[in-house]
């Protein structure tokens, strides 16, 4: 039985944390000050101007810009809807051929079978500036890129088990400990 108003309110609304985070950290305010975002095209408003070349790609340590894509099944995905709430595995495929479909189904099955609900698995054929295609980007809930994999074709992308290992790493890493090592 709740003993105070906060506990009573907490138990009454399951999504109370989303409301608090939405008020404190609007998902519409991406961290535009980061170098990774400043170099991507099209540039964000008020982002520092940096010369753009065709080779600008995200790297580990960069921050993932906000994006909207259609996933492999046609659902519109808005990164802002789970930014600061979930880790991300973003898989970019170049085509909807048989190998791509098989790879996407394996990944989506791994995402559905996961007992942890803190990671969003997005598979898309849309193209995004700064992200390899075909390729994989794994980012933590704050948008910091942890891993980028680029491949000449789907057959050379990381196997689903390797991506699950990266997700486990992101889930268990200690940012305070990493700060001491820098």
Image (cartoon, rainbow, N blue to C red):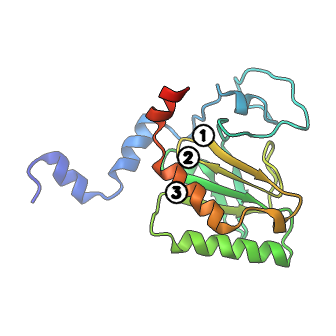
Image quarter in which the C terminus is found: top right
> Which mark is nearer the camera, 1 or 3?
3
Which residue is under mark 3?
168
Neighbours of disc 3 within 10 Å: few (<14), some (14-19), many (20+) = few
Residue 27 pos. (x, y %): 54, 41
Label 3: state its secondary structure.
helix
> Which mark is nearer the camera, 2 or 3?
3
Which residue is under mark 1?
144
Q: Which mark is residue 140?
A: 2
Whole-number angstrom distance, CA of label 1 to CA of label 3: 15 Å
- The residue drawn where x is 60% and y is 35% is 30
Contact (Cβ within 8 Å) of mark 1 with mark 2:
yes
Image quarter in which the N terminus is found: bottom left
Whole-number angstrom distance, CA of label 2 to CA of label 3: 11 Å
Against 175, is 87 above or below?
below
Sequence-earlier tag: 2 or 3: 2
Whole-number angstrom distance, CA of label 1 to CA of label 2: 6 Å
Q: Looking at the image, can residue 86 be seen? A: no
Residue 90 pos. (x, y %): 68, 56
- The residue drawn where x is 70% and y is 63% is 123
Label 1: state its secondary structure.
loop
Q: Which mark is residue 178?
A: none
- The residue drawn where x is 67% and y is 35% is 62
Residue 137 pos. (x, y %): 69, 51
């Amino acid at each position: 039985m709740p003993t105070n108003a906060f506990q009573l309110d907490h138990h009454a609304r399951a999504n109370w944390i989303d409301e608090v985070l939405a008020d404190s950290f609007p998902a519409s305010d991406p961290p535009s000050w980061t170098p990774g975002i400043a170099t991507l095209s099209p540039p964000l408003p008020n982002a520092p101007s940096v010369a753009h070349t065709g080779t600008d790609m995200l790297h580990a340590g960069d921050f993932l810009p906000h994006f909207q894509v259609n996933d492999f099944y046609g659902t519109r995905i808005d990164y802002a809807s789970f930014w600061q709430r979930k880790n991300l595995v973003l898989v970019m495929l170049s085509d909807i051929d048989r190998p791509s479909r098989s790879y996407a189904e394996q990944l989506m099955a791994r995402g559905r079978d996961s007992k942890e609900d803190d990671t969003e698995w997005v598979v898309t054929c849309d193209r995004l500036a700064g992200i390899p295609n075909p390729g994989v980007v794994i980012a933590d809930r704050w948008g910091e890129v942890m891993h980028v994999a680029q491949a000449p074709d789907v057959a050379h992308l990381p196997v689903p088990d390797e991506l699950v290992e990266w997700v486990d790493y992101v889930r268990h890493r200690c940012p305070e400990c990493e700060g001491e090592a820098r």
